[in-house]
Image: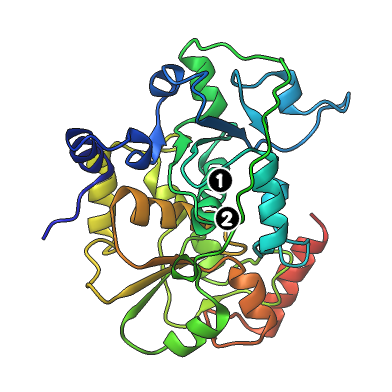
Amino acid sequence: MRRLTASLILAYGLALGLPAAHAAPLSTPAELATKLGAPNLRIIDIRDGRNEAGRTPYELGHLPGSLHAPYAQWRGPADNPGKLPDEAALTRLVQRLGLERDTEVVIVHQGKDATDFGAAARVYWTLKAAGLNALSILNGGVQAWQAAGRPLSTDPVEVKPSGYVAKIDPALVATRAEIQQAVGRSGTKLIDARPADFFNGRTRHAAARAPGTIEGASNLSHDVWFGKGGATLLPDGEIRRVAQENGVAGAGADEVTVSFCNTGHWAATNWFVLSELLGERHVKLYPESMVEWSAAGLPMSNVPGRLAQLLIDLKLATK
């Protein structure tokens, strides 16, 4: 049976009288604009950074009614940035934002490029793993909002804290131990979301121990789902075409797909497209990804010789 794309799921959901928030993982500026001020809506601005005057992008202008929760708050420590916050920390963050299980949440990033989208996808995955079920990403982020002629606000926003307690769903999270058991066996598809230079061992993340990829993985760079240099996802038909051309659509009923990268950032985009847009079953994200895997000295492919590794180390040290 053919799986339903996001647009078909939305159409069926509306026909059955289901809330659109539960069916549409992507929002357009026009769609979001019609919902501003709704009591069950929370717009989460995840933009990081400060300008020379010490002001954040959120302070300089945000979508009306949005709350600020910078991306760094959803991430792990510097030596393992892909690690999920523990359930207690995640609970505090979710409660501060006033989120309940059925709160309609729209995640907003800057909209610079495909990598920026990965931050929104990672927060989406984190919230879904924590049990929230009415999630969406603003396709194209703040830049798309402004390009559509929509206003920004500098007004402060306060919400009543919630009592929600986060509990991570293991069905969405791939662990190192699980992947160790899967390497070399049928039934699990490992997809490396990094650009080819990482997959082929020509460079590595600064926190990774060695270049290369997990043994048995295939490469599907996170940016294939976007137009050249684009920051918005391709239309549904193009998404399906890319998936079919790369052999990542139509996994068997019992087959598990694991998306990984360096720190579970780029991998979140592949997870989002496969799971939320294409409706593939049993798609997991390995949050710690190659930083953890390489540090543990586990089986890897495409690992270059010692001299090549030293040259990579030198390049990273002089950046």
* Residue occupying image coordinates x 54% and y 51%: 127
Check whether the beta carbons of the residues at disc 2 and disc 1 lie within 8 A of each other.
Answer: yes
Which residue is the site of mark 2?
265
Estimate how packed mark 2 is, as few (under 14), some (14 to 19) or many (20 or more) residues with alpha carbons within 10 Å.
many
Type of residue at label 1?
Answer: Thr
Q: Is residue 22 above or below residue 276?
A: above
Q: Is residue 166 left or right of residue 7?
A: right
Does any portion of residue 247 appear in the rendered image? yes
Name the image quarter holding the N terminus: bottom left
* Residue occupying image coordinates x 39% and y 41%: 25
Estimate how packed mark 1 is, as few (under 14), some (14 to 19) or many (20 or more) residues with alpha carbons within 10 Å.
some
Q: Please state which of residues 77 and 231 is positioned toward the viewer in this rendering.
A: 77
Which residue is the site of mark 1?
115
Report how far apart the C-alphas of labels 2 and 1 lie in the structure: 8 Å
Q: Position of residue 303 (x, y in %)?
A: 58, 80
Mark 2 or mark 1, earlier in chain:
1
Type of residue at label 2?
Answer: His
Snapshot colouring? rainbow
The residue lying furthest to the right in this view is 53
Q: Quadrant of residue 14?
A: top left
> Circle 1 — which element?
helix
Q: Is residue 159 above or below residue 274?
A: above
* Residue occupying image coordinates x 46% and y 51%: 269
Q: Position of residue 234 (x, y in %)?
A: 34, 38
Q: Please state which of residues 65 and 95 is positioned toward the viewer in this rendering.
A: 95
Q: Is residue 221 left or right of residue 152?
A: left
